[in-house]
Image: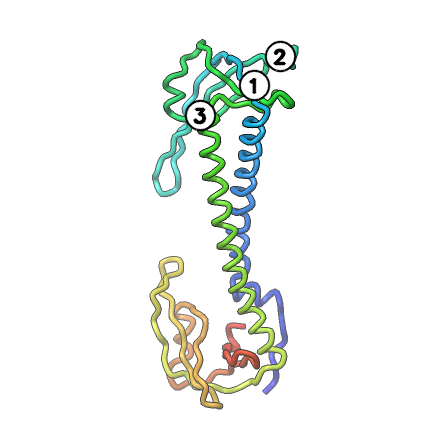
Amino acid sequence: MERKPVSFRRLVRRLGLYWLAFPLLFALVFGGVGVAMTRNAVLLAREGVVTQALVLDKQIETRRSSDGKTSTTYHIRYSYHPNERAEPITRRQSVSRSLYRQADTGAQIPVTYAWSNPDRASIDPAHDRIGAYIFGGFGALATLISLGLGGWMLGRKLSILRALRTGDVREARVTAIRETNVRKNKDRQYVIDWVDAAGESGTSMMDGFDALSMHPEGSVIVVYVDPKTGRGWWEDQI
């Protein structure tokens, strides 16, 4: 039988490798924010100077997610005058709900700023540290997921490449179309089971029933076998 040509673009689409970009982007964004917040907290702990800030304004932001859940963020805009600057500095910062309730507009509250960089300041260092832990934790979790998912996807891609380039090309007979517990866009996913000409059994990648029903039990398909692992890959899916 004629061997199917190798197409990296087709493999990326068929294996869904583009989904790997989402946890990677998540890890970069949350990890980057976590690192920035941690560096700021360390700087204030090392070089912090405490002075008084004037509360200029208070704001509450409420956002609604696509699933209907709401989240509330509390902001305080304040002004402080570091000894290292000729003019006061004005900042807007997210704070804890307790500090938001305690700080009245026009009141004086403590602010910690870095003497080497007076623009780096915080009126709620404890809240900032918690935020750094949360963002850093989510970033680390997304990184672990990306590494695990990427390794699994890379292994599948390498297996298919070996099968396409040097693996056996065999006819196989479909033995069943089997329902799985997985749903994709609310549609139940199915797989095809087969036994090839060498007597080896195999299973296809998941797909919708309409796509797989064109190959009912007893029909003949073509599979490529990975010479390293013995895994068979259905020609129509690679």
Which comes sooner in the sequence, label 3 or label 1? Answer: 1
**For mark 2, does the 10 Å Cα neighbourhood hold few (<14), some (14 to 19), or many (20 or more) residues?**
few
Callout count: 3
Q: Which quadrant holds residue 67?
A: top left
Residue 95 marker? 3
Contact, mark 2 vs mark 1 (Cβ under 8 Å) = yes
Contact, mark 3 vs mark 1 (Cβ under 8 Å) = no
Which comes sooner in the sequence, label 3 or label 2? Answer: 2
- Residue at 65 percent of width and 23 percent of height: 116
Label 1 SS: strand
Q: Amino acid at mark 1?
A: Val
In three-dimensional space, the C-alpha distance between marks 2 and 1, rounded to whole angstroms, equals: 10 Å
Label 2 SS: loop
Label 3 SS: strand
Give whichever of 7, 22 is nearer the camera: 22
- Return the residue at label 2: 83
In three-dimensional space, the C-alpha distance between marks 3 and 2, rounded to whole angstroms, equals: 24 Å
Q: Amino acid at mark 2?
A: Asn
- Residue at 53 percent of width and 17 percent of height: 50
- Return the residue at label 1: 49
